[in-house]
Image: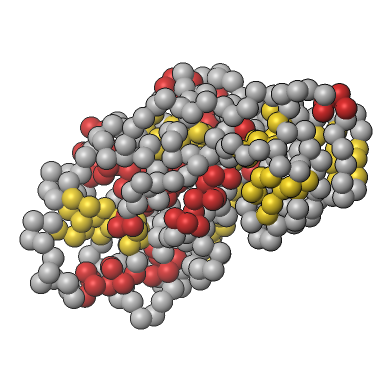
């Protein structure tokens, strides 16, 4: 615990309860005690009045509470003044009883436990897990014969209209992505960059994290892959997403939880950089460059998770139509039930085997799609059926490969 004299906030510092302007901090600022205050820029709105200006003092009836404290990570600031700045947008939360307890649930990603959990499982553990709402969708439409365009959307407005209690919104089109990448939706590869993003969402490596999407099973596997890649030891996906939760008339929450009320320390003990593949990795296989060094016991298999029309080159969403040479086709939807839940493990195993991917045969599996999203459903299925060998997601996928003239393409 910090004393009440200072608290490190990202790249900034708070002294004697006054927050200074840090450089490089760019999320929203919230000041509140039981939702009494909500601040943005230099304006703070309360339930009964509005306060503006660079500095203000909390009302005496709030300050008089002896247990009032501000919690950020593992630090406390007691009864201070706060200086809102348009450059400080991180959440500041007042709470009367300190930090929430750490979860007693422990698990490792190396185990064979199914990462897909039921709504009943989550309902019993709402206070013991971190929950990420990754709702969003892909708008695809025909711009000319055989050519589609896709727009990637995050459904933040839907989140505000209701979400699973305690869930924090995670934008799949912004959070944890490499802003400098020339290809859309490229995940941050450096855990030193990724960890602060997760901590800002209240995600700790000491606590299980459960991910849910709108209920079509598209986006949750993508964030599952990202967290496993960056070493989170216990990642789970809610089967059926929010749709199943709502269909069962389970409770929803309308306000945004304050992430700093939850202990958040993202410090993985082991990373898995091999879970991401590059175009160079696939080109080496396609060109046979590494054929002599490839293990005879482990066969490389490239899986295209797009629908069959794109695989066959009948429809394209990039400059070029077609597929990566040698790839087999396992459409994402073949692994999901019509209601959006994932097929049982036994059924997924059968889908994989019928496509030529036998979990019993040691395999170096590399999956791709258009943007490295649908491919993660294939990887999730391979993990669920305990597929032997290694697996990786080609994050650039067809958004990268299909827009380059120097890479081979099959039709």
Nearer to me, 33 or 248: 33
The colour scheme used here is secondary structure
| Percent position of residue 334, x then y | 33, 43
Q: Residue at x 91, y 38 (%)?
A: 50
Residue toward you, 215 or 37: 37
Return the residue found at the far left: 296
Q: Position of residue 60 (x, y in %)?
A: 88, 27
Query: Which residue appears at 88% of the width and 30% of the height?
Result: 59
Residue 297 picture quarter: bottom left
Horizontal and vertical percent position of residue 168:
58, 37
Whether residue 216 sits left or right of residue 281 in the image: it is right
Q: Position of residue 247 (x, y in %)?
A: 53, 23
Q: Is residue 83 above or below residue 132?
A: below
Number of numbered discs overlaid on the protein picture: 0
Q: Residue 267 or 242: which is nearer the viewer?
A: 267
Regarding residue 353, the answer to whether it shows in the image is: no
| Quarter of the figure with the N terminus | top right
Residue at 79% x, 55% y is 86
Task: State which quarter of the image contains the C terminus.
Answer: bottom left
Q: Is residue 173 visible?
A: yes
Q: Is residue 404 above or below residue 134?
A: below
- The image quarter containing residue 152 is bottom right
Nearest the viewer among 28 and 250 is 28
* Residue positioned 79% across, 37% down in the render: 80
**Left or right: 214, with 58 as reference point:** left
Occupied quadrant, residue 282: bottom left
Name of the residue lying farthest toward the bottom: 406
């Amino acid at each position: 615990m910090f004393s009440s004299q200072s608290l490190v906030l990202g790249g900034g510092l708070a002294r004697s309860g006054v927050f200074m302007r840090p450089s490089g901090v760019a999320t929203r600022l919230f000041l509140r005690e039981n939702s009494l205050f909500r601040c943005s820029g230099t304006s703070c709105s309360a339930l009964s009045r509005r306060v503006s200006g660079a500095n203000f003092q909390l009302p005496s009836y709030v300050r008089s509470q002896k247990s009032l404290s501000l919690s950020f990570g593992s630090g406390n600031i007691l009864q201070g003044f706060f200086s809102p700045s348009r450059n400080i947008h991180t959440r500041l939360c007042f709470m009367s009883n300190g930090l929430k307890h750490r979860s007693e649930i422990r698990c490792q990603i190396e185990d064979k436990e199914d990462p897909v959990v039921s709504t009943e499982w989550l309902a019993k553990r709402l206070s013991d897990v971190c929950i990420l709402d990754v709702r969003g969708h892909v708008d695809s439409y025909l711009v000319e014969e055989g050519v589609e365009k896709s727009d990637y959307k995050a459904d933040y407005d839907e989140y505000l209209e209701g979400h699973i209690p305690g869930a924090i919104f995670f934008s799949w089109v912004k959070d944890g992505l490499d802003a400098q990448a020339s290809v859309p939706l490229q995940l941050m590869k450096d855990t030193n960059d990724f960890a602060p993003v997760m901590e800002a969402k209240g995600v700790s490596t000491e606590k299980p994290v459960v991910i849910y999407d709108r209920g079509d099973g598209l986006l949750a596997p993508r964030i599952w892959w990202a967290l496993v890649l960056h070493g989170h030891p216990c990642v789970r996906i809610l089967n059926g997403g929010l749709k199943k939760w709502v269909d069962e008339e389970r409770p929803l929450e309308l306000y945004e939880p304050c992430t700093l009320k939850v202990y958040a320390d993202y410090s993985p003990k082991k990373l898995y950089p091999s879970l991401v593949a590059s175009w160079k990795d696939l080109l080496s296989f396609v060109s046979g460059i590494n054929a002599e060094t490839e293990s005879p016991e482990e066969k490389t298999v490239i899986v295209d998770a797009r629908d069959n029309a794109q695989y066959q080159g009948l429809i394209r969403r990039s400059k070029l139509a077609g597929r990566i040479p040698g790839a087999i086709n396992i459409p994402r939807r073949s692994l999901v039930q019509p209601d959006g839940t994932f097929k049982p493990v036994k059924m997924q195993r059968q889908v994989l085997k019928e496509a030529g991917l036998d979990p019993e045969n040691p395999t170096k599996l590399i999956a791709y799609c258009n943007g490295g999203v649908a491919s993660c459903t294939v990887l999730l299925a391979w993990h669920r059926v305990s597929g032997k060998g290694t697996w990786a997601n080609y994050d650039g996928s067809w958004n990268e490969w299909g827009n380059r003239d120097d890479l081979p393409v099959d039709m």
